[in-house]
Image: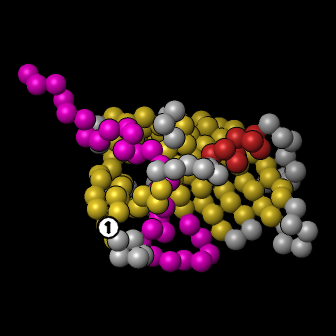
Amino acid sequence: MNPSIPFLKAENLVGRWSSEAFFYDAFEDTQLEFHADGTGCCAYIRPFHSDITLFKWSLEDDRIEFVNYCGVYIEDDEETGEQKHYTSRFENKSSERFFKAKGLNISKKEIDVIAFYYPLEQASGMQSFGLMSKELNNSFRDQALALMDVPDTMTP
């Protein structure tokens, strides 16, 4: 019997993936970040506020195993520019089937795409994400982690 052939290597998922890769929407975006250490986040981004769900992940053939463990809501005050936030800790596990494909971004350039068979609950129901960058500088995960140990400055 031949050993199973991996569906996709974990290092191919590392990077920032965006639901907005295929169209331009100035008011919102949902991004998935997969970091090489098996952590990541889903960030729902809108003007003046973001909702970030931190997760641990692993790749199992054609599935991504998610363990969501913290939510961080960040709001920017339009008048003062002050940033407020609150965090909530929880544990939610899911196993999500997906496939890898190629697609065209808004510049009509071919990009890698991951598409889930069902909308991701933590990703505001989005289903397809295009690879925006393999680099994870200024990551939403790091921004959320930095706020986890800071007392909440607003109530949910």
Query: Residue at coordinates 63% horizontally, 46% vertically from top-left?
Result: 141
Residue 89 percent across, percent down from the top left: 69, 38
> Which residue is at the front of the view, 2 or 51?
2
Residue 100 in view here? yes
Residue ID at (35%, 76%): 108
Residue 50 vertical placement versus 98 (above, below) = below
Amino acid type for the residue under numbered disc 1: Glu
Q: What stretch is highlighted in magenta?
A: 1-29
Q: Residue at x 64, y 52 (%)?
A: 138
Q: Is residue 89 above or below residue 29?
A: above
| Residue at 66% from the left image edge and 56% from the top image edge | 51
Task: Specify the quadrant of the image occupied by residue 10.
Answer: top left
The residue at which mark 1 appears reads as: 110
Quadrant for the C terminus in the image: bottom right
Horizontal and vertical percent position of residue 145: 70, 41
In depth, the one of 34 and 61 nearer the eye is: 34
Q: Is residue 3 magenta?
A: yes
Q: Is residue 119 left or right of residue 1?
A: right
